[in-house]
Amino acid sequence: MRVAIDTQPGGVAPNEDWVAGTPALAVVLDGLSTAGLDTGCEHGVPWYVAHLGSQIVSAFADPNTSLTVGLARALERVAALHPQCDLSNPGTPSATVAILRERHGFLDHLVLADSPIIFDGHQDISVITDLRVDQVLPELKAEVARHETHTAGHKQALRNLVAAQRETRNTATGYWVAAANPEAANQALTGTVPAGDVRAAALLSDGAACLVTDYAMSTWPEVFTTLRVAGPRGLIDTVRKVEATDPSGQRWPRYKSGDDAAVAFCQW
């Protein structure tokens, strides 16, 4: 498996996405925004995703470890690194997870929340994503969408949304992300496909996937064409060019003018 990776922040704030690739493993993490609210953690989201990512890679040094078990171990290990923090805080640093592993002629995948894995098969395109977050708090999301980005109203509406999301995060009636509780690993979408059925695969944070999912300015086949021609940086550059045409979020209401973006492009 040949893996090309890239990640870029969406603005001046530190990048809260994380990506890694090895000859057998690709990982994309998308840290969840805190909207300036308290997290109970002295370290922050960039620290969390960097340590979770490294622990995930370490957990799969043994290729026989299942993706669910490996992610659970990584979550436990990161929690053990900062016991002085309030890990019971509902806003404790958290992230979406996308993992792809090649093993014995098969591709194992795991998706937790809305960072998708897209397979470019010989017959068609398939998308693995967990959109439970889209089912909660539609009224508060609509309120965010009413405001242009960088306005006081947008900032307050986003804070209200994030505060409410925290109460549904990692609950049976809400949605699941990687945080401090290893049970989240058991809530991920997992599966296995024969490697021979796939020409390429892409793991994307939503800051890169939005080109298709939110802006509808590209299709998945076009995304794979961009990745083959210009690589992950080319795809992120395309997203930025599109966003630059709508900096205030009037055409495409969104949480930020530009979100952090991470891409892992896998080929065989």
Image (cartoon, helix red, strand yellow):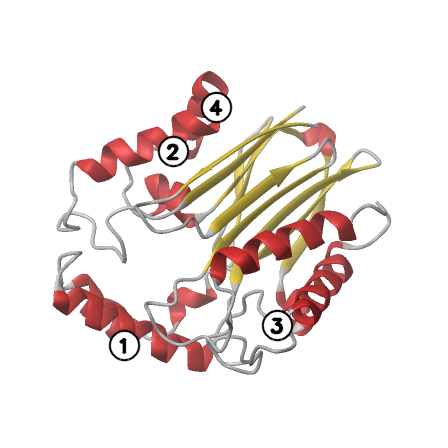
Residue under label 2: 236
Residue 240: x and y in percent read 29, 35
Circle 1 residue: 160
Secondary structure at numbered mark 1: helix
CA gap, disc 2 to disc 1?
29 Å
> Where is residue 9 shown, x and y percent of the image?
38, 44
- The CA span between labels 2 and 3 is 30 Å
User: Which is nearer the N-term, disc 4 or disc 2?
Assistant: 4
| Residue at x-position 42% and y-position 23% | 226
Label 2 neighbour load within 10 Å: few <14, some 14-19, many 20+: many
Query: Left or right: 33 with respect to 5?
Result: left
- Disc 3 is placed on an element classified as loop
Front position among marks 2 and 3: 3
- Residue 131, numbered label: none
Q: Amino acid at mark 3?
A: Ala
Q: Nearer the viewer, mark 4 or mark 3?
A: 3
Q: Quadrant of the N terminus?
A: top right
Position of 124 compared to 70: left or right?
left
Q: CA distance from mark 4 to mark 3?
A: 33 Å
Which quadrant of the figure has residue 246?
top left
Q: Residue drawn 63% across and 51% down? A: 53
User: Closest to the observer: 210 or 163?
Assistant: 163
| Mark-to-mark CA distance, 4 and 2 | 9 Å
Q: Quadrant of the C terminus?
A: top right
Q: CA distance from mark 3 to mark 1?
A: 23 Å
Q: Nearer the viewer, residue 59 or 114?
A: 59
Residue designated by label 3: 180
